[in-house]
Image (spheres, grey):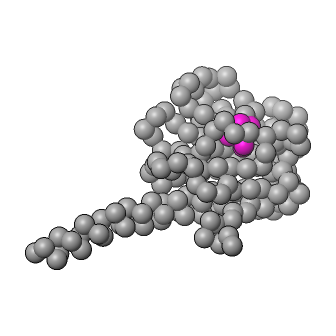
Amino acid sequence: MAVIAALVSLAVPTWGVITRSHGNNAAVSLVMGTLEQARLAAVSGKKEVWVLFKNDDPGKQASLRIVTREGIGGTGAVPFTSAGSWTKLPPGITFQTGESTLMDQKPLAEVIAAAMGTALGASISPATSIGGVMFQRSGRIGIPQQGGPALLLRLRSLKGPLASPIELSRGSGRASYNSPSSKP
């Protein structure tokens, strides 16, 4: 019995590390996959495509959503529509705010209204933070514009920020992530 108890006491902390690591990797894969899906939708559909990042009230999961605008037109000329529902990140993973990243890029009011399913100008909870990125019809990044927030998205787990941010290329719109285990 003592041997079994000793093995269990060694395995429990390791299991926590494994499950946290799996959640972190799943969150990075989910975000990168959504960014690539939005970029491809912009290119293939020749339309403006936004990805919104949302941290809800404390205790809720972070999520992201794709919002599109068919056709070309000035603000409000062509309505925005949401593609699918909010995709939730694994429990305990949120988007880090306050570091001049994509979470500091406030989407257009029409984009937020389409994503939230509310009327234009409707209020959202003050505890909810929303950031975003817009892909142009070419697949390039349109918003944030040069000189705005960095094209970085940092994820945060319960234990603190993940080691590396997800970075977008302004020219190609492609996302990249340098896993800490892949660094020399």
Rendering coords of residue 141 (x, y %)? 84, 50
Which quadrant of the view contains residue 25?
A: bottom right
Q: Is residue 9 visible?
A: yes
Rendering coords of residue 104 (x, y %)? 71, 36
Which residue is more in the foreground, 4 or 35? 4
In the image, residue 44 sits, relative to residue 5, either above or below, namely above
Residue at (65% x, 57% y) in the render: 164
Q: Is residue 104 magenta?
A: yes
Which residue is more in the foreground, 147 or 136? 147
Which quadrant of the view contains residue 111?
A: top right
In the image, residue 113 sits, relative to residue 156, either above or below, namely above
Q: Main secondary structure of the magenta part?
A: helix
Rendering coords of residue 145 (x, y %)? 87, 41
Q: Is residue 11 magenta?
A: no
Q: Is residue 39 visible?
A: no
Residue at (74% x, 39% y) in the render: 100
Is the C terminus in the top left, top right, bottom left or bottom right quadrant?
bottom right
In the image, residue 109 sits, relative to residue 9, either above or below, namely above
Is the N terminus in the top left, top right, bottom left or bottom right quadrant?
bottom left
Rendering coords of residue 163 (x, y %)? 61, 57
Range drawn in magenta: 101-105
Which residue is more in the foreground, 179 or 48? 179
Number of disc labels: 0
Residue at (60% x, 22% y) in the render: 123
Residue at (48% x, 60% y) in the render: 23
Which residue is more in the foreground, 78 or 170? 170
Which quadrant of the view contains residue 31?
A: bottom right
